[in-house]
Image (cartoon, helix red, strand yellow):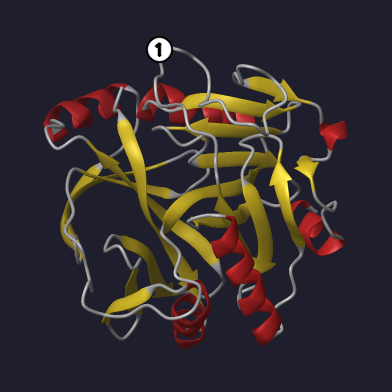
Amino acid sequence: MIQVRRIGHATLETPDIDRQIEYFTGIVGLVLAEREKDRAFLASKLGPLTVQVERGDVPRCARLAFEVAPDTDFAAAERFLAGEGIKSERRNDANPGVRTMLSLNDPNGVAIDLFPEWTPLALGKEARGIGVLKLGHLAHVVEDPRKLADFYCRILGFRVSDWIEDWFVFLRCGADHHTVNFVVGKQVKMHHMAFELKDWAHLQTACEVFGQRRIPIIWGPGRHTAGHNLFTYHRNPDDQIVELFAELDLMKDESLGYFEPKPWHRDHPQRPKVWQGSEGGVIWGPPPTPDYVRQRQ
């Protein structure tokens, strides 16, 4: 098994790079670190590479990058993957800030890049817009969430945090409640990507930005059941759902088997569980709008 520690960045393909750069810098609050003809690299205001945008025919998430321990033996990882029938390749100088990677594909066709170290980007540049802290998680619509969950747990060391019935799984690789999610839907594609904010006040500021820029909120604000995070959802210029969240559940000690106690929990202690779909996915807040639900339809 390869032990992934945290999510690094996502690579999004888009027909309009300039439009996506303006969205991620002007609204989300990432910083443009480097720009080439057919791709751009955007970092959070804290330094890590967060989103890579590349020219493509249709909008999609093409790659996900995850950090592994600095002493990870890539030769041993390659042998392990080969034994599982998984092709892999090493890549050098693939991205600014992330120089060495081991790449493979998940069963969904998304490329997975594993990197052991990184350097901060664009720390001297001021962020505009909302100013997110990091890429928190990414969810995909798939035909069989159990198949993807098995791959990520067996190959990359993820653990199951929660299920919503049998159609939505939440997987973690570190303290955060979830890093990748898989949900049943009619068309395989990205469901949403999520960025972490500092707190409720930061989330309120984001909502004010949406109001000023006339960007519809398609679900929220509210507090989820699985993960218990505060949330709001909107769509980016490529019609992809973007979540902004704060106060996500943390499992700081895996051996205890429960998430850090919080006053908004209904279970004490809050352990991984299967939630009922009848709960609507919220502790409080409005139900999802049709514009949110159509992502699975």
The front one of 188 and 11 is 11
Residue depicted at 12% across the width and 31% down the height:
75
Q: Position of residue 163 (x, y in %)?
A: 67, 27
What is the three-letter code of the residue carrying label 1?
Ser
Residue 174 vertical placement versus 257 (above, below): below
Q: Residues within 10 Å of mark 1 (few under 14, many from 20)?
A: few
Residue tagged by mark 1?
255
Q: Quadrant of residue 173?
A: top left
The front one of 87 and 171 is 171
Residue 101 vertical placement versus 75 (above, below): below
Task: State left or right for residue 26 relative to residue 83.
Answer: right
Q: Position of residue 282 (x, y in %)?
A: 77, 42
Residue depicted at 61% across the width and 78% down the height:
209
The front one of 182 and 28 is 28
Residue 148 in view (yes/no): no
Q: Quadrant of the N terminus?
A: top left
Q: Quadrant of residue 133?
A: bottom left
The front one of 74 and 228 is 228
- Numbered disc 1: secondary structure: loop
Q: Quadrant of the C terminus?
A: bottom right
Q: Position of residue 179 (x, y in %)?
A: 48, 41
Residue 247 in view (yes/no): yes
Residue 182 vertical placement versus 273 (above, below): below
Residue depicted at 58% across the width and 47% down the height:
139
Q: Position of residue 26 (x, y in %)?
A: 48, 83
